[in-house]
Image (tube, grey):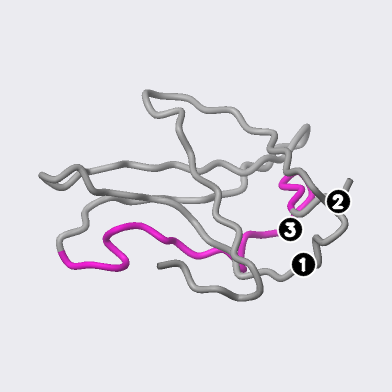
Amino acid sequence: PKILYDFTTLPDLDKWRESSDHTYREPGMSKASFVLQKTQLFQRAILFSVLNLQPNGAGFAGYIADDHWNLEEYSALELLTRAQGQNGIYKIILRHKGMNIS
């Protein structure tokens, strides 16, 4: 297996940036924050998100990292996560060869 991100050992989240509706359009009001929680015993990444939906139900809050990997020899993706709160649904987007998110 190839580990893309091990948040238990990363020194920082400098390559990650917010990708929420308020960063892309004026009426957007959702917000995300991505931080490393570090203690003497453990380290982990925490994504906080607040969805403030538009009248039509649109809204998103998250973070993005622009990394590049050759994953040709892999056929599966495994995520180790834990959700708290009312929203336990998350979306992961992998772009093929630099394709833009539309």
Q: What element carries label 1?
A: loop
Q: How far apart are marks 3 and 1 (CA)?
A: 20 Å
**Which residue extends farthest left?**
55
The C terminus - image quarter: bottom left
- The residue labelled by disc 1 is 69
| Closer to us: 36 or 94 | 94
Could you tell me the amino acid type at mark 1?
Trp
Q: Residue at x 42, y 61 (%)?
A: 19
Q: Position of residue 28 (x, y in %)?
A: 21, 58
Q: How dense is the environment of label 1, judged by Cα within 10 Å: few (below 14), some, or many (20 and up)?
A: few
- The residue labelled by disc 2 is 2
- Is 8 colored magenta in this rendering? yes
Task: Using the image, tell me which numbered label, if any, was put on residue 11.
Answer: 3
Could you tell me the amino acid type at mark 3?
Pro
Q: Is mark 2 on a helix, strand or loop?
A: loop
Q: Which residue is drawn at 67% across and 69% down?
A: 67
The stretch of residues the image draws in magenta is 5-26
- Is 52 colored magenta in this rendering? no
Labels 2 and 3: the sequence-earlier one: 2
Q: Which residue is drawn at 61% across and 48% down?
A: 36
Q: Residue at x 49, y 44 (%)?
A: 91
